[in-house]
Image (spheres, rainbow, N blue to C red):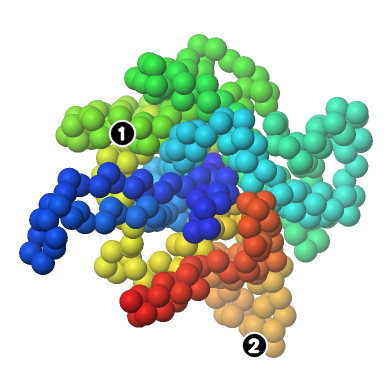
C-alpha cells in the first residue's frame, strides 16, 4: 500500500498537496488604511493536514508490518489515504503538460527504488539465489523480470527462501523485503493513467469516481477472475482507483459541492457494507481487509471521503500537534525512503536484539523469559532509529531525484529558523 510537494517546490512520488492561493478579496477600507486598499492575499503553502494524514499512514504501515494486527486495516486504511493524497497532487500538477508531469513523477520515483534494489539484489545473490534456476521465476523470463527492480511495471521476482534458517536473517526475508514494491507498481500505473482519468473525471465525474468500485465488485465477487500477477495488478488498480480519483475530486472541489451530512451518511453506509462483506469473507488473517478486495475498496473509499470532507487545510499544525511538526515534515520529505526500507529494517532488528541473549546478565531463565515476552516491543523501539539511519544513508537520493540540493535530515528546522530571523528583521 503512497505519495510530495516540498518546501523547495519539488515533489517526491508518494503525493502531497499545497494550499492554493485564495483570490484577493474586494477592496475594503479599514481603520488606518487608505481608501481602496486591500489586504494582501494569503500566500500558498504546505497543506499540513494532508501532511499529517500521510505521516499517520506511514506509521500505521510500519506498525502493521511489525505486529500484523489485522484490525489496523480497519482503524486506518493507510494505502487508500496515500493513493488519495497522491491523486490530489497529480490533479494539481496536470495543469502543466501531461508528458512532462509523468516524466517528472517517474524521475522522482526511480532513483530511490534503484538504491533499494541494488542492496536487496546484492543480498539475494550473496545468499545464493540464482534467478536462472529459481523454480518459481527461473529461466530467461526470470532474468527479464529483473527489470521490475529498475522500472516497477510488474511484480519483481524474488526467492521464497534464501540463505539459511540459522543465518542472521530468516530465510524468507526476501519475500518481506519485496512486499512493499506492489505500491510503487500501482503508483506508476496510476501516474501514467492520470491524464486520461482526469479527462474522464472532468467530463463524467461521478461515473469516473464510482467506476473503480463497480469494477472491484466484478472482480471481488468472483464474477470475473484474472489469475496470476496480472490479476493482482488489476485488482490493486481497481481497489484503490476510487481513492486516487477521490484525490481528483478533492482538488477540483467536487467533494465540497456535496453537503457534508450527505457525504458522511453515504460514506458510512458504504463502509458498513464493506464491513458486512468482510464478515462473510474473512481470510486467513481474519479481519485483514488486504485479503478482501471489495471490503477494502468500500471501506477505504468511505474513510477517505470523510477525511477529505473535514479537511481543514492547515498551513500550520495547530495546538499540541505543533510539537510533531519536525517529524511530520521529515516523514513527508522522506516518505519514499521510509516506505521502501521499513520491512527490511523490521527484519534487521531481529539479529540485533538476539545479541542481547549473549549478555552476562541474560543467562537466567527469568531474564530470557522477560526478553521473549517483550521481544516485539523491542523490535518496535529499535526500528525507528534504524529508519533514521536509513534516512541519513539513502534519503538524500530523493532530493537528487527531485533535482534539488541533497539534505541529510530535512525536518524543516532550518527553514523555520530562517523564517524566524526574517520576522525579527521586519
Q: Element type at marker 2?
A: helix
**Position above or below: 364 against 298:** below
Q: Which mark is drawn over residue 108?
A: none
Number of numbered markers: 2
Q: Residue furthest left?
A: 31
Q: Nearer the viewer, residue 65 or 156?
A: 156
Whole-angstrom CA distance, mark 2 to mark 1, is: 62 Å
Could you classify mark 1 by the number of other residues whose Cα lies within 10 Å: few (under 14), some (14-19), or many (20 or more)?
few
On the rendered structure, is 160 left or right of 47?
right
**Position above or below: 211 against 268:** above
Q: Residue furthest bottom?
A: 360
**Position above or below: 331 against 214:** below
Q: Which residue is mark 2?
A: 361
Q: Nearer the viewer, residue 192 or 100?
A: 100
Image quadrant holding the C terminus, namely bottom left
Say whether marks 2 and 1 touch (CB < 8 Å): no
Task: Give x and y (percent) for residue 270.
Answer: 31, 28
Q: Nearer the viewer, residue 407 or 207?
A: 407
Nearer the N terminus, badge 2 or badge 1?
A: 1
Q: Which residue is mark 1?
A: 253
Task: Give x and y (percent) for residue 415.
Answer: 47, 70
Q: Element type at marker 1?
A: loop
Q: Quadrant of residue 212?
A: top left
From where the camera sits, is residue 139 visible?
yes
Task: Give x and y (percent) for residue 163.
Answer: 84, 53
Residue visible at 29% across and 46% down in the picture: 22
Task: Give x and y (percent) for residue 302.
Answer: 33, 34
Image quadrant holding the N terminus, namely top right
From where the camera sits, is residue 53 visible?
no
Amino acid at each position: 500500500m503512497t505519495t510530495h510537494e516540498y518546501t523547495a517546490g519539488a515533489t517526491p512520488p508518494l503525493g502531497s498537496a499545497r494550499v492554493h492561493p485564495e483570490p484577493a478579496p474586494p477592496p475594503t477600507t479599514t481603520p488606518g488604511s487608505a481608501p481602496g486598499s486591500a489586504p494582501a492575499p494569503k500566500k500558498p503553502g504546505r497543506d499540513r493536514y494532508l501532511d499529517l494524514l500521510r505521516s499517520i499512514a506511514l506509521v500505521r504501515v510500519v506498525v502493521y508490518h511489525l505486529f500484523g494486527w489485522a484490525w489496523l486495516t480497519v482503524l486506518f486504511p493507510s494505502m487508500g489515504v496515500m493513493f488519495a493524497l497522491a491523486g490530489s497532487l497529480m490533479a494539481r500538477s496536470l495543469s502543466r503538460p501531461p508528458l512532462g508531469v509523468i516524466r517528472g513523477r517517474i524521475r522522482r520515483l526511480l532513483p530511490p527504488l534503484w538504491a533499494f534494489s541494488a542492496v536487496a539484489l546484492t543480498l539475494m545473490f550473496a545468499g545464493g539465489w540464482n534467478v536462472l534456476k529459481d523454480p518459481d521465476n527461473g529461466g530467461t523470463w526470470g532474468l527479464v523480470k529483473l527489470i521490475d527492480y529498475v522500472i516497477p511495471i510488474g511484480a519483481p521476482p524474488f526467492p521464497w527462501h534464501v540463505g539459511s534458517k540459522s543465518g542472521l536473517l530468516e530465510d524468507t526475508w526476501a519475500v518481506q523485503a519485496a512486499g512493499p514494491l506492489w505500491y510503487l507498481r500501482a503508483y506508476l500505473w496510476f501516474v501514467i493513467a492520470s491524464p486520461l482519468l482526469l479527462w474522464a473525471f472532468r467530463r463524467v465525474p461521478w461515473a469516473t469516481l464510482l467506476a473503480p468500485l463497480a469494477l472491484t465488485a466484478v472482480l471481488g465477487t468472483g464474477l470475473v477472475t484474472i489469475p496470476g500477477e496480472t490479476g493482482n495488478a488489476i485488482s490493486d488498480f481497481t481497489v484503490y482507483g476510487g481513492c486516487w480519483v477521490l484525490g481528483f475530486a478533492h482538488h477540483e472541489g467536487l467533494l465540497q459541492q456535496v453537503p457534508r451530512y450527505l457525504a458522511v451518511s453515504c460514506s458510512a453506509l458504504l463502509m458498513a457494507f464493506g464491513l458486512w462483506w468482510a464478515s462473510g469473507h474473512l481470510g486467513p488473517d481474519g479481519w485483514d481487509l488486504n485479503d478482501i478486495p471489495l471490503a477494502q475498496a468500500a471501506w477505504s473509499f468511505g474513510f477517505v471521503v470523510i477525511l477529505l470532507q473535514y479537511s481543514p487545510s492547515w498551513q500550520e499544525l495547530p495546538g499540541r500537534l505543533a510539537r510533531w511538526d519536525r517529524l511530520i515534515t521529515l516523514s513527508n520529505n522522506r516518505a519514499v525512503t521510509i516506505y521502501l526500507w521499513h520491512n527490511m529494517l523490521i527484519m534487521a532488528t531481529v539479529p540485533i536484539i538476539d545479541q542481547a541473549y549473549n549478555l552476562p546478565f541474560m543467562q537466567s531463565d527469568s531474564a530470557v523469559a522477560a526478553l521473549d515476552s517483550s521481544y516485539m516491543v523491542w523490535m518496535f523501539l529499535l526500528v525507528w532509529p534504524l529508519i533514521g539511519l536509513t534516512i541519513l544513508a539513502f534519503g538524500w537520493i530523493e532530493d537528487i531525484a527531485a533535482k534539488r540540493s541533497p539534505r541529510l535530515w530535512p525536518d524543516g528546522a532550518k527553514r523555520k529558523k530562517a523564517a524566524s530571523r526574517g520576522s525579527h528583521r521586519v
